[in-house]
Image (cartoon, rainbow, N blue to C red):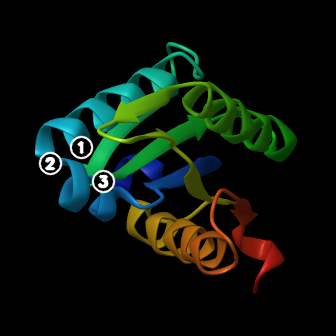
Amino acid sequence: MNSSNTNNRNLHLIFIDIDGFKDINDNYGHLAGDEVLRTVARGIKDSIRNNEIAIRYGGDEFLIILEGTMQNDAKAIAERIQVNVGKDRFDMEIESIKITLSIGLHYGIESMSDLIVKADKAMYFSKSHGKNMITVFNEIS
């Protein structure tokens, strides 16, 4: 989707980052990290409708593009993703770990790059204020 496709459209963008993903790769290996990525992707897919777009943005980051969705519904989708992903536990060597997500949410009629920047800032607010949170951009600005 290019930025011209987002002009004059109200979009919600959900920006997701897996908490502690680097530690998982460092401590348990990349095969464990790959399994976590697959599980998160499955949790996202199971939480959104067919007409919504989910993208692995890079590393351990995912974007969800929602069109024609109210803010309360977008936040409910983000919460559903957290719950679905949080159900799984991973048995690693000597411990079992639960995956948590830091999520940022932004809504607007803006270019895709502007939506991403603001949703990313909201996600970093979640990450820096305790992780496993959902932050709406306009609540921090």
Tell me the tag on residue 24: 3
In this image, 92 relative to 133: left or right?
Answer: left
Q: Are marks 1 and 2 in contact (CB under 8 Å)?
A: yes
Distance in Å between CA atoms under marks 3 and 1: 6 Å
Which three-letter amino acid code belongs to the residue tagged 1? Gly
What residue is rendered at 81% in x and 39% in y? 70
Which three-letter amino acid code belongs to the residue tagged 2? Gly
Nearest to the observer: residue 140 or residue 81: 81
* Residue at the front extreme of this rendering: 94
Location of residue 48 (image quadrant): top right
Sequence-wise, which precedes: disc 3 or disc 2? 3
Q: Are marks 3 and 2 in contact (CB under 8 Å)?
A: no
Name the residue carrying label 2.
29
Tell me the tag on residue 20: none
Nearest to the observer: residue 5 or residue 70: 70
What residue is rendered at 86% in x and 42% in y? 72
Q: Is residue 66 above or below residue 104?
A: above
Name the residue carrying label 1.
33
Q: Secondary structure at mark 3?
A: helix
Location of residue 134 (image quadrant): bottom right
Q: Is residue 53 above or below residue 127?
A: above
Mark 1 surroundings within 10 Å by alpha-carbon count, few (fewer than 14), some (14 through 19), many (20 or more): some
Which three-letter amino acid code belongs to the residue tagged 3? Ile
Mark 3 surroundings within 10 Å by alpha-carbon count, few (fewer than 14), some (14 through 19), many (20 or more): some
Q: Are marks 3 and 1 in contact (CB under 8 Å)?
A: yes
Nearest to the observer: residue 94 or residue 21: 94
What residue is rendered at 78% in x and 74% in y? 138
Distance in Å between CA atoms under marks 3 and 2: 7 Å
Q: Quadrant of the N terminus?
A: top left
Mark 1 or 2: in front is 2
